[in-house]
Amino acid sequence: MKANIRKLVVQVDEIRIEMGKPVVPPTRRAVAIAVIANPCAGRYVDNLDELIEIGAELGKLLGEKCVAALGITPAQAESYGKAAIVGEGGELEHAAAILHPKLGAPLREAVEKGAALVPSSKKMGGLGTAIDVPLGHKDAAFVRSHFDAIEARVSDAPRAAEIVVAVAVTDSGRPLARIGGLQKNDITGQDGLR
Amino acid sequence: MSLIEIRRVFTHVETIEHEFGPRTVPQHRGAIGAVLKNPYAGRYEPDILPMMEALNPVGLEMARTLLAAMKMEPEQINSYGKGAIIGSAGELEHGALWHVPGGYAMRELLGWQGGRVSYTQGQAGESTAPQSRPLAIVPSTKKVGGPGACLDVPLTHITACYVRSHFDAIEVSVPGAPMADEIVFILVMSSGARVQARVGGLTPEGISKFDGQR
């Protein structure tokens, strides 16, 4: 493995009751987080290929961790998202190198299909900085019930020369979603949008 | 009305590979937070003990769910702790309801053979059998907090609380919880020592008194 992982965190959030009403079946969201050394910290590095390759590794690792934590088959995954927090010895572009060129393909394999854009967020941060990982339906970005976010946070990371990388996967939309729009049962799932 | 309404269950598992030093044995830690409605929120209720009894099966379910999330067997767990975060319409004492059901559910799951009944009744209880590993008190902390409040939950060795390598803590927060009328009840477990423990003191191998302390 190219990535030097200091810590790996997996969280599952299951909502059974919302505003006094049972959520049936409960919504379940998972987020898997890797705390890695930033090989480009502390100086300007022009070529970010090393981070791009780390992104590919983490797309597979974190995507599979989420699916396993939810106890579902890859096909049962419904929405996904990704995010990174770069410690202060790095630069925002390092998050972009991890997240955008190569992380998506292995993540899509982990959740089977994935025609839609993987929504993302990134920021610079310090120890315990929280990032809200956006969530969208994996096959049709306009599915309104699945627009959501899950918070990712590691109390002792990122150190200055670290990056926190998070991938989120769910088997459901928001609890008690009821604001209309495109429904998951009505998608074609081909163009990534509807 | 049932005293138990579980609104949300949050699990957290982590593997610590290293802390910038040499790689040794990775440490596996886990936490579970169950978000329950606080049936006593918004008023002073003199008799809150019925909820302590009602929480017993919740504690056991949580301990089992956490072990499953950690993918570990009871014999692989070597330290533990517990905690509670009470929403703003409750009082600290509501969190204290967790002392018996939280601690004993986890201890029994890990093989404790002592007497929960006598402890519940405020008595010392019969002497514990040396062959049961979870002899030590389950360390705890609690506070009243708002949604997303963080609690540093202590961890200590399950057989002897003075084992120095196992003094630890894990920060637990459930984003969005507790709301005013909720309580987050928390259990935490770990595979063992801090990942680069090296400050001496009592070691697991040195446990000899089996009194829960040394």
Image: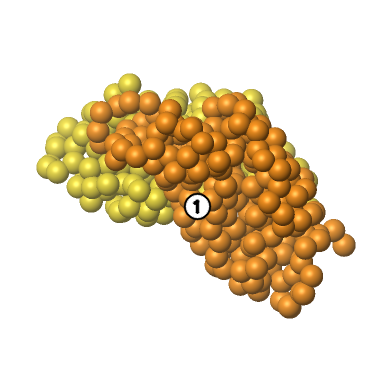
Q: How many marks?
A: 1
Q: Is residue B45 visible?
A: yes
Q: Which colour denotes chain A? A: yellow
Task: Name which residue type carries label 1.
Answer: Val
Q: Toward the viewer: B165 or B30? A: B165
Identify the residue at horizontal 80%, vertical 54% (top origin): B54
In the rendered image, the quadrant that contains the N terminus of chain B is bottom right
Depth check: B77 or A19 in front?
B77
Q: In the rendering, at what x and y percent does residue B63 appear?
A: 65, 40
Residue B140 x %, y %:
55, 54
Residue most extreme to the bottom: B43
- Image quadrant where residue B77 sits: top right
Q: Colour of chain B?
A: orange
Give the structural element (helix, strand or loop) at label 1.
strand
Farthest-out residue, top: A1
Determine whether, in the image, residue A147 is placed left or right of residue B8. Answer: left
A156 and B141: which one is in front?
B141
Which residue lies at the image location 70% right of the left edge and 39% below the top edge?
B114
**Which residue corresponds to the image point at 79% horizontal and 54% vertical from the top-left?**
B53
Q: Is residue A178 left or right of residue A143?
A: right
Find residue B83 and report its image quarter.
bottom right
In the rendered structure, the answer to whether residue B121 lies left or right of residue A65 reads right
Q: Where residue A33 sits: x, y (%)?
A: 43, 39
Residue found at the very far right of the displayed protein: B1
Q: Is residue B181 left or right of residue B177?
A: right
Quick one: label 1, few (<14), some, or many (20+) residues within 10 Å? many
The picture places residue A56, in percent across and down from the top left corner, at: 37, 27
Q: Chain of mark 1?
A: B
> For mark 1, what is the residue?
B153
